[in-house]
Image: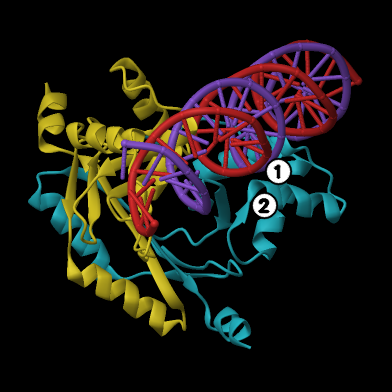
Chain colours: A cyan, B yellow, C red, D purple
Amino acid sequence: MSVTEQPEGGARRQSRQRSAVLTLLDELDGFRSAQDLHALLRERGDSVGLATVYRALQALVDDGQLDVLRSPDGEAAYRRCSPSHHHHLVCRSCGRTVEVADPPVERWAARVAAEHGFVDVQHDVEVFGTCAVCAATRQG
Amino acid sequence: MSVTEQPEGGARRQSRQRSAVLTLLDELDGFRSAQDLHALLRERGDSVGLATVYRALQALVDDGQLDVLRSPDGEAAYRRCSPSHHHHLVCRSCGRTVEVADPPVERWAARVAAEHGFVDVQHDVEVFGTCAVCAATRQG
DNA sequence: TCGTATGTGAGAATGATTCCCATGAGCACG
DNA sequence: CGTGCTCATGGGAATCATTCTCACATACGA
């Protein structure tokens, strides 16, 4: 269980590597694994160490600038996201993602939690599927 | 948890190890990692190989007899559960879990997926919070 | 410009999970 | 009740993502 701490006061120092990671994420669409991002950075010439990529990603997540998603096989995937609360619709074939927000789900989560006496509630909702494009491609 | 299909037809062979895993899970309450379960089996004398524990767990998950939950640090945790589709309300303090089922969420997931042209949809929903007992304790 | 705390990188370490493969044991059949 | 064909087992190696280590580089305030 992760208690989200906020080191705050953290005078986060700026660096070429860190902005490279953020820039790359700005240009990409779906969720990408740390390994993927590292490879992409290498390809484009922004050589960055793997450990640094992991560190940068964690820092960005702590700062609330990224969403993390754990794929069924346990790999973590990251994505630049809008700051408001939302969930994801992820294509399991091409990785394309759509942000979806829907008050009813929020209410549902709050309600079931309340019914069982739970407080200080958070929820994780991810919907996986095959997007129209991939479904069509696969057909033929 | 996620909605998965049940391949069925599986002429699953019965074995001491497999029933030991299932029996153990029947006696336990919360979610346990494969490593934990393996250690527990060793302690009680039901010696079972680690690889076998993993295989048994996967088989049981495929058969819909277990729920899998991935903790934030990537470790998978398993739990005996009712066979019908449902989600979990997990106490982030004591780990107590409550199974919750609610058709509206299922419909919501199906609807948003359909709206975006996604097919072959699954969803993961976990609600985390602090249960009444832990909340009361913490007050002190 | 300087000092120093912080970030970086390469590779080693960690830890969960899976693979390999020779051996063991269900189960259908006679 | 034996026989055989498979699938299951186990243990150790292999894999893979992630984290750690530590010497070195560098951002940034004074």
C-alpha gap between disc 1 and disc 2: 6 Å
Specify few, some or many for label 2: CA neighbours under 10 Å numbering under 14, 14-19, or 20 or more.
some
The disc at residue A22 is 2
Front in this rendered view, residue B103 or A62:
B103
Q: Residue A106 — which label?
A: none
Is residue A78 shown above or below D24?
A: below
Residue D13, by quadrant, is: top right
Residue under the image location 19 percent in, 70 percent down: B103
Q: Which residue is mark 1?
A: A18
Q: Residues within 10 Å of mark 1 (few under 14, many from 20)?
A: some
Q: Residue at x 24, y 50 (%)?
A: B88
- At horizontal 52% and vertical 44% (from top left) the residue drawn is A61
Chain hosting mark 1: A
Question: How far from the left and from the top, in percent, is residue A64?
Answer: 49, 48
Q: Are marks 1 and 2 in contact (CB under 8 Å)?
A: yes
Residue A107 horizontal side relative to residue B115, left or right: left
Say which of B97 and B130 sits in front: B97
Judging from the image, mark 2 belongs to the subunit labelled: A
Q: Amino acid at mark 2?
A: Leu
Amino acid type of the residue tagged 1 in the rendering:
Arg
Where the N terminus of chain A falls, by quadrant?
top left
Q: Where is residue C10 drawn, in percent x and y?
A: 84, 29
Indicate the secondary structure of the residue bearing disc 1.
helix
Number of numbered discs overlaid on the protein picture? 2
Q: Nearer the viewer, residue A135 or A35?
A: A135
